[in-house]
Image (cartoon, rainbow, N blue to C red):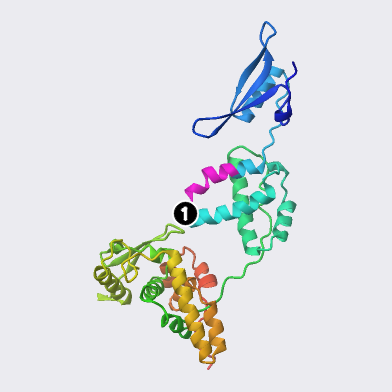
Amino acid sequence: MRIKKAANRDLPPRMLRRVRTLKSGAQWVGYYYDGRDENGRRIEIPLGTDLDVAKMEWAKLDRKAVPKIVRLLGDVFNRYERDVIPGKMPRTQKDNLLSLKQLRAAFSDAPIDAITPQIIAQYRDKRSGKVRANREISLLSHIYNMAREWGITERENPAAGVRKNKERPRDFYASPEIWNAVYSCAVSELRDAMDLAYLTGQRPADVLSMRATDCVDGHLQVAQGKTSKKLRIQLETNGQTNELGRLVERLLKQRKERGARNPYLIITGEGRNVSASMLRLRFDDARKFATHNARDGKDELLAEEIRKFQFRDIRPKAASEIGDLTHASRLLGHTDKRITETVYRRIGESVKPTR
């Protein structure tokens, strides 16, 4: 009786695929050779659960050349998500998964060796989000590098030489007038977060994760979530408690008064820790009230500038208002001062006139 191949059309002749559902609910997939024993009776010879290995075993039994292994990018994406992404920082994981979703929609069904620089350039040009396209191409490039390490492909990385879209760094600067307008409308925990973000120059997520136990030996210890960079920010200057030190003292005292049961420095009036979503909502509310106040005062220009202000602009505000570039770069945790200068310094350098 001839075996029907309807479910195995992607396999070589006389190779079968068997799929079983285990008690755990997971699916088990195995491959078999449809052969004959010494008496001519039909038997299924196990070839293993790995398709590539199964094809090599099939070639030995069928006395044929090993078929060329065609790997789809979708399979490589799955392995990258399983083996590589979990080892990255949480924010990077989130960004990678977002990029991977777009890459899957475009490339999952394509053989890994079929992608050329021209195809990637076409993908770049069709993407409406130009900055997102750059992130996706960078991720695709790393995926190809990993695929080469895994032995899945021997071809050159097709994404390596593809030109990226030009990006313009955000150049918004929160002037004292804008800062004061929002700060005056902020609730107490938002003011605390704004002060701590400005005095430390750290990212919003790092500000919210600062704990009482991070204050050790006259320093506020910081472990940046994005880069794992470790800093010890001084709480004293020339033997005197500086402004950051006074803020930290107030926040520690505030924790006791509010009966905080969590370890964080930024807490609500009820002693609860402030999450990222809570911070965003509080900042949005303060900005909205500040915008209305500016419009009530007939200052449409100020109102428009206030609307552009985001909490993340506090970090570049701090970098811009530190006179010494080296100091600013070290406080922000940058290894290259050029990043601080080109991306985070948003006001011009103070210079003397000709005369």
Residue 330 covered by magenta stretch: no
Determine whether, in the image, residue 355 is placed left or right of residue 126: left
Q: Is residue 351 visible?
A: no
Determine whether, in the image, residue 233 is placed left or right of residue 53: left
Q: Quadrant of residue 181?
A: bottom left
Instruction: Please provide percent x and percent y for residue 323.
Output: 43, 79
What's the magenta bit mostly, secondary-structure-wise? Answer: helix
Instruction: Please provide percent x and percent y for residue 208.
Output: 39, 65
Q: Nearer the viewer, residue 40 or 220?
A: 40
The three-letter amino acid code for the residue at tag 1 is: Met
Instruction: Please provide percent x and percent y for residue 116.
Output: 73, 48
Label tally: 1
Q: Where, quadrant-wise, is the N terminus in this rendering?
A: top right
Q: Residues within 10 Å of mark 1 (few under 14, many from 20)?
A: some
Residue 81 covered by magenta stretch: yes
Which residue shows up at 63% across the image and 67% down it? Answer: 167
Instruction: Determine whether the residue tagged by mark 1 lies in a helix, strand or loop.
Output: loop
Determine whether, in the image, residue 289 is placed left or right of residue 141: left
Q: Is residue 54 visible?
A: yes
Residue located farthest toward the top when viewing the structure as drawn: 39
Which residue shows up at 58% across the image and 41% down it? Answer: 149
Q: Is residue 9 above or below residue 210?
A: above
Instruction: Please provide percent x and percent y for residue 340.
Output: 50, 70
- What span is colored magenta in the figure? 78-88
Q: Quadrant of residue 121?
A: bottom right
Q: Nearer the viewer, residue 132 or 14?
A: 14
The residue beneath circle 1 is 89
